[in-house]
Image (cartoon, rainbow, N blue to C red):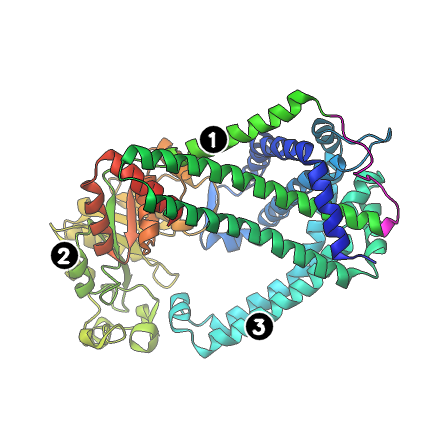
């Protein structure tokens, strides 16, 4: 019988007893993953992307790439490399808590070497498991894709997200069923094979044999194993949350009682930050150790033999090893501190870019929203352009008027006179009743001389001449110099550059694989989750600017101002403008203190 209380006792004892070599291996693994594994696997995966003829693949092109042979291979290898990295870390910790052939425990260095020797077997084990999981998941993925197309394919995705029609809830029902099915099928496979890694390590079996033996050992106890695995995972997941809450409270408590002296406050907060980094490192180490030893202890019980007993003899440690590990912890904590401080930038010229005008206080892509954004201090007004059935360029985000005016027809199917008669304001607020869909020319006249134009083309196969039409219109309006031309489509931007070589272009990136920084455009405008200080450094090295979208939360605005991006695209240009004015009035010490207060503990 596998009892959670017994496993808990054994795991805690093992972590306590082997804490120093386990921690040393944790640090070795981090160095291996950062310095060797990530560069090598990244180079291999990037090479596959180059086979497709592009340095990066993003946005809608990702789906098309995924169903190609090269794309399928990329997914398989990426998941396999990730699985092997996890196996590598768990394997080392399992070996440390196990005896070798001479009856001695493995040191961290010995465990690292033994895992490296077994790397080919780990690669094959990971490949087999990933392929099997993908094969089992494919029918469920196909079901979800078919349901999405059948239920929501006729709608603009933005309409679905904001209005949530009945078909949206029907699709969620299908999606929920699919998730349950995936958890049941793939979860059962995970439990079936969860002991394959210790079998491969301890019994020196080949991957296929280890998988078969794992299936035999877990056959009658998988439900019990599921309860144990989920329980332990929940506890481990809560630890970083508790650490974060603890340091949140400590940070604000210290700020409330410290004297109003910038040097003292900054010094205390820097010490607290270093401590936070060290505790996070230890929490991550504890979580990985518990998961690794959980699998090992379950293996021991199912084998009914005491392999790797951890309480007979005191392991032989050299004094320098213990001191070295402790020194490494301090170095890593300081490194975290330095990285956090280097993430701050004194970039002053940050553009305030109003997303569809001030779409927080007025209906998007209308003259009212544009005027409000200009009054709020926006540097650029980001707008979306499409054309009507009779070729008039108008401001419209969605492909139809369903969300805004209840008309399901596509914009390219509606003549301008009909479109002009529709109410584009009441959906937002009755105060804007009768607000029309403006033309691009009308928007330019409102913006001219007061702000720049950040124009995104919303291309579609039904509008093959949209880019040339926009270029011709901007040229006739003498607005090219004050325009940043943006698109999710690389082809649209290349076409625009061919027509107007001096035009500033911005590639909008929602999701991508590969090196997006090598795209031949002046600006990368990336979704907020993709923007990091490291990404900003890479973009700057390519001579490009980095914009981030769509940032409406004041805390996130502060963070990106601190990071030093070149532009922030927001629905709330007034909030961003106030924040930028506030920061401009502060001296350097005040800005650093505010960053430590809000960027780390808000």
**Residue 508 seen anywhere in this rendered image of the structure:** yes
Residue labelled with disc 3: 174
How far apart are labels 1 and 2 at the CA level?
44 Å
User: Considering depth in this image, is 422 or 330 the residue closer to the camera?
Assistant: 330
Q: Which residues are magenta?
A: 302-316
How far apart are labels 3 and 2 at the CA level?
46 Å
Residue labelled with disc 2: 375
Question: Given this view, does label 3 or label 2 mark the residue nearer the observer?
Answer: 2
Answer left or right for 582 relative to 467.
left
- Tell me if residue 181 comes above or below residue 475 in the rendering: below
Quadrant of the snapshot with the N terminus: bottom right
Say the numbered circle drawn on residue 335: 1
Answer left or right for 115 relative to 579.
right
Q: Where is residue 462 shown, x and y percent of the image?
A: 37, 64
Crowd rating for badge 1 (residues with CA inside 10 Å; few <14, some 14–19, many 20+): some
Question: What SS does tag 2 mark?
Answer: helix
Quarter holding residue 175: bottom right
């Amino acid at each position: 019988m596998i009892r959670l209380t017994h496993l808990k006792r054994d795991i805690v004892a093992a972590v306590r007893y082997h804490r120093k070599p386990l921690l040393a291996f944790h640090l070795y693994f981090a160095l291996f993953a950062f310095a060797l594994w990530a560069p090598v696997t990244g180079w291999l995966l990037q090479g596959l992307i180059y086979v497709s003829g592009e340095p990066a693949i993003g946005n809608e092109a990702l789906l098309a790439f995924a169903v190609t042979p090269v794309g399928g291979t990329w997914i398989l290898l990426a998941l396999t490399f990730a699985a092997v990295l996890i196996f590598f870390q768990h394997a080392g910790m399992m070996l440390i808590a196990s005896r070798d052939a001479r009856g001695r425990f493995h040191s961290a260095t010995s465990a690292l070497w033994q895992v490296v020797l077994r790397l080919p077997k780990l690669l094959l084990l990971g490949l087999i498991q990933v392929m099997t999981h993908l094969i089992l998941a494919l029918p469920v993925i196909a079901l979800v894709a078919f349901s999405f197309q059948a239920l929501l394919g006729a709608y603009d995705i933005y309409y679905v997200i904001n209005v949530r029609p009945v078909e949206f809830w029907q699709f969620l029902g299908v999606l929920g069923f699919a998730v349950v099915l995936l958890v049941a099928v793939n979860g059962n496979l995970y439990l079936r094979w969860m002991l394959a890694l210790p079998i491969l390590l301890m019994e020196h079996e080949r991957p296929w044999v280890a998988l078969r033996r794992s299936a035999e050992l877990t056959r009658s106890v998988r439900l019990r194993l599921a309860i144990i695995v989920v329980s332990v995972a929940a506890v481990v997941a809560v630890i970083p949350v508790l650490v974060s809450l603890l340091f949140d409270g400590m940070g604000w408590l210290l700020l409330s009682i410290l004297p109003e002296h910038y040097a003292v406050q900054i010094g205390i907060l820097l010490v607290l930050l270093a401590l936070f980094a060290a505790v996070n490192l230890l929490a991550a180490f504890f979580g990985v150790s518990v998961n690794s030893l959980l699998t090992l202890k379950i293996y021991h019980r199912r084998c009914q033999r005491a392999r790797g007993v951890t309480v007979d003899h005191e392991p032989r440690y050299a004094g320098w090893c213990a001191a070295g590990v402790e020194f490494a912890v301090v170095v890593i904590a300081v490194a975290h501190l330095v990285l956090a401080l280097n993430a701050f930038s004194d970039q002053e010229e940050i553009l305030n870019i109003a997303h569809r005008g001030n779409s927080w206080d007025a209906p998007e892509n209308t003259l009212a929203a544009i005027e409000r954004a200009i009054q709020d201090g926006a540097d650029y007004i980001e707008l979306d352009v499409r054309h009507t059935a009779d070729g008039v360029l108008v401001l419209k985000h969605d492909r139809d008027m369903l969300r805004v005016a209840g008309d399901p027809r596509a914009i390219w199917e509606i003549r301008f006179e009909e479109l002009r008669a529709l109410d584009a304001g009441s959906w937002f607020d009755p105060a804007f009743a009768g607000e029309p869909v403006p033309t691009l020319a009308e928007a330019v006249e409102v913006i001219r001389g007061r702000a720049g134009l950040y124009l995104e083309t919303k291309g579609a196969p039904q509008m093959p001449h949209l880019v040339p039409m926009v270029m011709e219109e901007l040229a006739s309006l003498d607005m090219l110099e004050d325009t940043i031309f943006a698109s999710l489509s690389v082809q649209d931007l290349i076409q625009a550059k061919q027509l107007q070589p001096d035009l500033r272009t911005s590639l909008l990136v929602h999701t991508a694989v590969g090196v997006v920084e090598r795209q031949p455009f002046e600006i990368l405008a990336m979704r907020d989750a993709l923007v990091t200080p490291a990404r900003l450094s890479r973009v700057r090295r390519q001579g490009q600017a980095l914009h981030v979208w769509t940032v409406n939360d004041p805390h996130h605005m502060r963070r990106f101002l601190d990071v030093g991006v070149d532009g922030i695209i927001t629905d709330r240009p007034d909030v961003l403008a106030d924040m930028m004015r506030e920061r401009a009035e502060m001296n350097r010490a005040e800005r650093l203190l505010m960053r430590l207060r809000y960027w780390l503990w808000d």
